[in-house]
Amino acid sequence: MRYEVPILGILMLALVSCGGSGNGDPEPEPPVLVTPPSAATLIFPDNNTECNEGVVVNATQSTVTFRWTEAQNADTYELNVRNLDNNNTARSNVSTNSTDLTLLRGVPYEWFVISRANGTNETATSATWRFYNQGAGVENYAPFPAEVVSPERGSTVAATGNVSLVWAGSDVDNDLVDFEVFFGTDTAALASQGTTTESTFVATIDAGTIYYWRVLSRDSQSNTSLSEVFEFRVQ
């Protein structure tokens, strides 16, 4: 006697034996891509101005409200405010685009904002602005400390025999008079190279040497400010 197996039964057996039951492990979910945040635009305190909108706390302190635009894709912000007299930096982490900070009066500051987004380590940093926090009875402010333009700090320059030192000076009273340049190979004994009304000075350099320099800014009222020490290496 001959038995016949239905064709449908054969197909089902073949699917089971080949693992074609359709119950395999699902494909892994693709990773979620987080869009990095954009940089915020600073609003207040304005750049290179006197901040006179703070709330006076006492004779030496006032509270200033920092404001900036909301940045795309940003969840939080880190406000950085640096005292240009002592280089101390205050940091504040907030989820809004403004925050209050109590500062010393009659002191120059610089500030910037870092945008952060949840789920990514990428950040974006705003421009850096400077201001003087209004002081009691101050009629004329000292210049802001000069900022390096060239050579950039920590850079290496070609051994051409000389280099142009370039900086940027600013003053809320717009009465800058001149600059005194200090230059040398020993940070503890930088020699004065004289004064200039320009924002550049040509210095003589030797190959294979690290040089340091800084600038003293002076205004019409003989108020002065001294920049940080900048350095560069000669090939």
Image: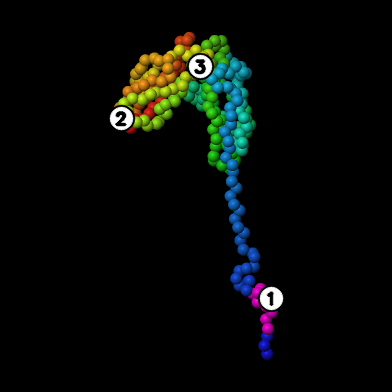
Secondary element at tag 3: loop
Q: Is residue 14 above or below residue 102?
A: below
The Cα–Cα distance between marks 1 and 2, rounded to whole angstroms, is 89 Å
Question: Circle 2 sits on which residue?
Answer: 207
- Evaluate whether residue 46 shows in this view: yes
Q: Which of the pair 82/211 is nearer the observer?
A: 211
Image-quadrant location for residue 69: top right
Image-quadrant location for residue 80: top right
Magenta residues, as a range?
4-13
Secondary element at tag 2: loop
Q: Picture coordinates of residue 73 (x, y %)? A: 61, 38
> Callout 1, which amino acid?
Leu
Question: Circle 1 sits on which residue?
Answer: 8
- Sort mark 1 into few (<14), some (14-19) or many (20+) by Cα contacts within 10 Å: few
Report the residue at 56% width, 14% height from top.
135
Image side of residue 105 versus residue 235, left or right: right
Principal secondary structure, stretch drawn in magenta: helix
- Sort mark 2 into few (<14), some (14-19) or many (20+) by Cα contacts within 10 Å: few
Query: Mark 1 or 2 closer to N-term?
Result: 1
Secondary element at tag 1: helix
Report the residue at 41% width, 25% height from top.
230
The verdict on residue 8 being magenta is yes
Question: Circle 3 sits on which residue?
Answer: 171
